Amino acid sequence: MLKHYNVHGENATLTPNPSPASGRGERSESLRDYVKHLAALLLALSSAAAQGAPQKIEAFDAQSWQRLQQELPRPAAVVFSTTDCTHCPAAIAAVAEQLKKSKEQTALVVVVMDGDQHPGLLQDPHYRQASRLFVFKGRSAPLQYAVNPKWRGITPYVALLPQAGAVKLVLGEPSAQEFGNWLSAGGK
């Protein structure tokens, strides 16, 4: 129920307008209490929205890809991106949206290939959709080769790790059919 408040006098108390249903007013609150409640509500809402956001930037080195494939709970998605990639934010958002639709708790990892020169990555909204955020540490070509010897560094590059079976690598945003096949793979 939406309440409308009147401000009264110099002591700045808030009194709810009378409810149309009851015809009477409710108890008065001081402005300070009202602001405290409002601030607590806003803090709770912002915390809930950012609950899965990465808290730190991790290094992605030559051993990281093998380690991630073993350690990540499956299914999981890894999006390789660059800071100047115009299609990457949309790809990250599409993967995040598909994961929200699935019944599984699915990890979304973003690896930024040129992120070591950008300390503000954690504040970028599209990276905040990830549960973990990595940046390449080392020469790019060997790290790309560790992921897929045929990959030439074009982004977005999405790795879909099914519950069981081989990783599906997609250049660009995966289609709805690719998402469906990935989420159902190994689940049967």
Image (cartoon, rainbow, N blue to C red):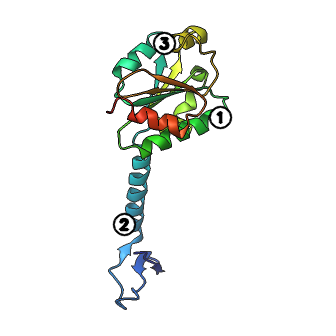
Q: Secondary structure at mark 3?
A: loop
Q: Position of residue 82 (x, y in %)?
A: 62, 26
Q: Residue drawn 41% across and 52% down? A: 43
Which of 185/41 is in front?
185
Residue 131 appears in the figure: no
Give me the C-alpha separation between circle 3 and circle 2. 51 Å
* Residue 16 percent across, percent down from the top left: 40, 80
Mark 3 and mark 2 in contact? Answer it, CB < 8 Å: no
| Label 3 vs 1, first from the N-terminus | 3
Upstream in sequence: badge 3 or badge 2: 2
Residue 176 placement, left or right of 32:
right
Residue 73 located left or right of residue 96? left
Residue with the mark numbered 3: 61
* Circle 1 residue: 87
- Using the numbered discs, state the Cα–Cα distance from disc 3 to disc 1 in whole angstroms: 24 Å
Q: Which mark is residue 33?
A: 2
**Quarter holding residue 86:** top right
Report the quarter where the C terminus lies. top left
Q: Nearer the viewer, mark 3 or mark 2?
A: 3
Q: Identify the secondary structure beneath mark 2.
A: helix
Nearest to the observer: residue 76 or residue 163: 163
Residue at the outermost bottom position: 23
Residue type, label 3: Asp
Residue 118's quadrant in the figure?
Answer: top right
Q: Residue at x 52, y 40 (%)?
A: 176
Amino acid type for the residue under numbered disc 1: His
Measured from the top left, where is residue 14 in percent x and y?
42, 76
